[in-house]
Amino acid sequence: MDLIVRVVEIKGCCPAYKEGDTFCLREGYLLESDKPLCMHSLASLMPHYNALRVSPPTSWGLAGRDSPEKAYIQCLDPYERTGGGTAIFEITCRGKEND
C-alpha cells in the first residue's frame, strides 16, 4: 500500500513547499518525490506512516472532520515564533484491496 502526501495549507512562508505539492511513500518504505523534501515534514510523518498503512486515520486520531478516510499532520516549524512556515499535509492511502 502507498501513502500519498499532499500539502493542503501553508501557514506563514514555507521555503520548501507550496500548496498542492505531493510526494509518495511507496510500498511502505520507498520515498518518491519530484522535488527536494524538508526534513521537518519527514520527522512529522515518521511516527504515523506505518500505523496509517494498517489502520484507518480514525484509529489514530488523525482523521479529517469532513474526510475521515484521510489523515492530517503538520510539520514541526512553529511559524509564529520562527518567521518560517508550517505545512499541513493530507495523507491518503492508495492500494487497499477495497480501493
Image: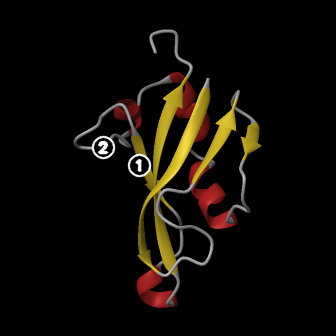
Q: Quadrant of the N terminus?
A: top right
Q: Is residue 21 above or below residue 78?
A: above
Outermost residue toward the right in this view? 30
**Going by the image, does 22 lie left or right of 99?**
right
In screen coordinates, is 71 left or right of 82?
Answer: left
Q: Is 9 drawn above or below residue 62 in the view shown?
A: below
Q: How many marks?
A: 2
Q: Residue furthest top?
A: 97
Q: Secondary structure at mark 2?
A: loop
Q: Amino acid at mark 2?
A: Gly
Query: What residue sits 47% from the left and 78% below the top?
Result: 78
**Picture coordinates of residue 41, whole percent (x, y):** 60, 60
Q: Which mark is residue 23?
A: none
| In contact (CB < 8 Å): disc 1 and disc 2 | yes
Residue that appears at 64% across and 41% down: 24
Which residue is at 59% across, 46% downward?
A: 47
Q: Which mark is residue 72?
A: 1
Q: x, y (%) of residue 68?
A: 30, 34
| Element under disc 1 | strand
Indicate the position of residue 22 as horizontal and vertical percent values. Answer: 57, 50
Tell me which amino acid carries mark 1.
Tyr
Q: How is the image coloured?
A: secondary structure
Residue positioned 69% across, 32% down in the render: 26
Residue indicated by mark 2:
64
